[in-house]
Image (cartoon, grey):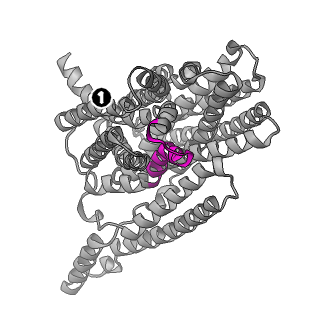
Amino acid sequence: MRASLRTSLPLVSLSLGYFLVMLDVTVVTVAVPDIGASLRAGPAALQWCVDGYSTVFAGLLLLGGGLGDRFGHRRVFLWGLGVFTAASAACGLAATAGALVAGRLAQGAGAAFLVPASLALLRAAHPDRAARARAVAVWGAVASIAFGAGPVVGGLLVAGLDWRAVFWLNLPVGGLTVFLTMRHIPAVRVLQGPGAGRMDPLGQVLGVVGLVALAGALNEAGTAGWTAPPVLVAAVTGVVALAAFAVVEHRLEATTATLATPATLAMPATTAASATTATAAMTAASARRPLLPPSLFRRKAFSTTAAIGFLISFGYYGMLFLSTLYFRQERGYDALETGLALLPSVCMGLIAAPLLSRVTARTGPYVPMAAGLFLGAAGFLGWLVASPGVPYPALLFALAATGLGQTTTALAATAAVIDAAPADGAGVASAVFNVARQVGSAAGVALFGTVATAAGGFTAGLRLSAVLAAAAFLVGGVLATALLLGARRRRHAEKREAAATGLVPRVG
């Protein structure tokens, strides 16, 4: 019993860290009216109080993943926790809207360091694929519960205490997470030896500028419109910076590969050749290492799963945004009633986690991934019956199916990304997956918000958006099915090869 508790404490610590990140995505939304009244904040400040967190979170994820691979994921995880907890205290003490927005931006920075490191530590703590699938299921279920409970918890705290209690809640949870991490997660430096190289400052700057600008443009487009000058400037800046980032990373990786495999290795073992080889090896060891190696995307399982991460967040969070407006505006629910109405969707992690841990251990991640995507697509079509007067039970299938489909897919995709990531790039790989999900979420909210206002009525816009979300999940289902068939072909080929050579095929 004591041994079992000891082995589960690292997972508890990592899950609590992700719990904080996901809770603060939704817990603040219900406190916005009280924040505006208390701090006399205008609409722009209130929008940045909500969106600034996710913008900085998306923009710094790649940097956070790269720092974890370079300096050790435990250290960066603790950095992120420290920044997030301190920023939460600053938000709770904020006397002006500007101070609160600054605190929210700092929270996003802490979250960007914390999340990739959390996934990388999860992989290191569970090298066995089946055990890792179970751990990922628990980790994701805790985050799903935090996300779903956010509006309810926020509503209760605001009603019973004050809007500042929304931020004070993070302090004891953050402190407990730091304590558990220090006690039960070993310090392991993932990237060591000559491959470590030096940092990539130009790539880091371009990546941060590009992602922050793109995420900011998507967040602003939902309210200001796609043709608003700030949106266009931010979008162009983001695209140009990310294009330059891709060029820089490609050149760095090509240079590193050339230095790591010098032609002199094929020379005769003379003293001059040995000296040349040693010099080349030292040069390779000191060369700058790309923040995001482009070769990572040549791993089909990784790049396809990242695309699926974008699609599920695009469809689900775009529709979650509209369904929140539907319950508030079309049905007249208050914040707490809206949070309770959405629970059948946002708390599906309680069902998805035990299902995934059993299925993935037997089939791998692609079967539940494909099943979740097709289920979610069917669920979105259930929103076609929506109208201001439709009975709430008529919407339960749409809420439950989309929530279960999205959560199952997200957890399975997380397990697949961890499996596909190289050992020395787990932080960056998990960061890319989370960037894809954050950009997908921002794009879905912006696009579906535009559709809802331009479709000649909110209900018509809601239904059209539901069709778009279903299409996104169907495309993801086709991609997941292709990965599943490819994995099965590889297993069959390995079995045939093993039968021909008399060797036992590798398990998993």
Q: Quadrant of the N terminus?
A: top left
Residue 55 is covered by the magenta coloring: yes
Residue that label 1 marks: 12
Q: Is residue 412 visible?
A: no
Q: Quadrant of the C terminus?
A: top left
* Mark 1 residue element: helix
Q: Nearer the viewer, residue 430 or 145?
A: 145
Image quadrant where residue 291 sits: bottom left
Q: Residues within 10 Å of mark 1 (few under 14, many from 20)?
A: some
Q: Is residue 230 visible?
A: yes
Which residue is pictured at 70% across the width and 34% down the height? 470
Q: Nearer the viewer, residue 1 or 234?
A: 234
Which residue is pictured at 52% across the width and 22% down the height? 348
Please name the amino acid that badge 1 sits on: Val
Residue 483 rendering spot, x and y as whole percentages: 58, 42
Up-down relation of residue 139 to residue 222 (above or below) = above
Residue 470 is covered by the magenta coloring: no
Residue 131 rendering spot, x and y as whole percentages: 35, 29
Residue 199 rendering spot, x and y as whole percentages: 32, 66
Which residue is pictured at 32% across the width and 43% down the height? 90
Up-down relation of residue 379 to residue 269 (above or below) = above
Secondary structure that dominates the magenta span: helix
355 left or right of 504 in image: right
Which residue is pictured at 46% across the width and 66% down the height? 206
Q: Which residues are magenta?
A: 38-59
Residue 370 rendering spot, x and y as whole percentages: 60, 33
